[in-house]
Image: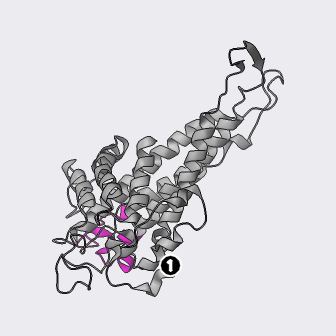
Amino acid sequence: MIFTGGADFYPTGSAKAPAGTRGRGHSGDASSTLKGSAATTPVCATPLSPIPPSEENSTSFDDSFPLLDGPDDASDISDLNDARKEIQKMRALLKNFKQENTALNTHLMETLLLGTSGFIISGGNFHGEYPAKALDYLAIGIQELANISERRMERLVNPALSNLPAFLVQNGGLNSGFMIAHCTAAALTSENKVLCHPSSVDTLSTSAAKEDHVSMGGYSARKCLEVISNVEVVIAIELMAACQALEFHRPCRSTAPLEAVYDLVRSAGVEPYDEDRYLAPDIDKVTDLIRSGAVWEVVEPYLKQREASQIDEVSPIDMMSRGQVLTLCRNL
C-alpha cells in the first residue's frame, strides 16, 4: 500500500539522476509503487482523471507528478494493473463506501413518528434487507484493499519484479525472509473471498411464517467485521515489507511523509530483517498502528500541507492511494 522497490533509484543531487530530478528532495524516491513497477508518468496524466465521470473523479490532480520523475521503462507496462490503475480502483472503492454509509444510516425502526403531527405508522421498516445488502457489498469493497495489497506485496518479494533480494532478505535459502509473511497475507486474502459470499441471498421462514422472508443481516455484519480485521493484517504485512524494501536502497531517502511512516514502524519495535525471526509479534505491532490511527496521524499533516500549498512533497498517487486508503482504514 505504501511503497515498493525498483531499479530507478538515485540519491538527491546525483549526477546520475535524470534531468529535472536533481536537487529535489524526493528524486531518490523508493516509495512509489508506480515507479518501482516501471509505470510511466503519462499513465497518470491529469486529462485521464475525469474518466469515467463521477464525483470521485473530480479530484484536482497536479501535472508535475514529482515522485514519478525519472527514467521510464514501459517494457512491461501492460502487466502493471496493480500499480498504474491505483487511482481508478481507489475511487471505485470510495464510491462504494459512500453508498454503503448512506444505506447503513437508513432508519430501520418498526414504528415511525412523522413530524409534529403525531402521525404514527408501522410499515415494516424494521426489515434488515437494506443494511444486510449494504454490509455484504461493503465487505466486498473492503476486500479489494486486501486483493490490491497482496498483489503489490508480490512485486516486493519477487526478485524478478523488484530487482531486490528474493523475499527481501540476504542469504536466501538460509533465510526465508518475507516468504511466509506473504503466504499469510495471501491466505487471509483468500479467506476473505469466502467471507464475502453474501449472506443476504439466503432466507428461512421463522416465527410461524409471520417472518416469511428474513435478511440474514446479522451474519452480514459479523462477516464484514471479520473481513475488515483480515484486511488490516494484510495491509500491515505489506507495510512491513515496504519498510524492509527501503533498507536495500539506503542511503537513499524516500519522501518526508513516507520516511515518517517508516520511522513510526521502526519506533514500534519492528527492526530490519537481517535474518529470519518469528514475525507474528511484528505483524501484531504494525496492525495495531493501523487500527489505532497512528499511521494516519503521521501522514495527515503532509496531505493537508500538500492540499493547502501544492508542494512537491506528496504526489497525487500518494493523495489517493495512500491518503484515502488510510482514511478508510481509520474510519473502519
In the image, residue 266 lies in the stretch drawn in magenta:
no
Name the spot of residue 243 as percent of width and height, x first: 27, 61
Q: Based on the displayed image, in which of its 4 quarters is residue 206 positioned? A: top right
Residue holding disc 1: 79
Comparing 272 with 91, the one in front is 91
* Residue 199, above or below 6: above
Residue plotted at (29% across, 50% down): 301
Q: Which residues are magenta?
A: 155-180
Element marked by disc 1? helix
Q: Amino acid at mark 1?
A: Asp
Residue plotted at (67% across, 27% down): 108
Name the spot of residue 25 as percent of width and height, x first: 21, 70
* Residue 22, above or below 137: below
**Is residue 175 visible in this depiction of the protein?**
no
Residue plotted at (40% across, 64% down): 316
- The quarter of the rendered structure image containing the N terminus is bottom left
Name the spot of residue 307 as percent of width and height, x first: 36, 56
Q: Characterize the local packing of mark 1: few (<14), some (14-19) or many (20 or more) Cα atoms within 10 angstroms.
A: few
* Residue 79, above or below 132: below
Residue plotted at (45% across, 70% down): 83
| In this picture, residue 134 sits left or right of residue 330 | right
| In this picture, residue 128 sits left or right of residue 299 | right
| In this picture, residue 231 sits left or right of residue 28 | right
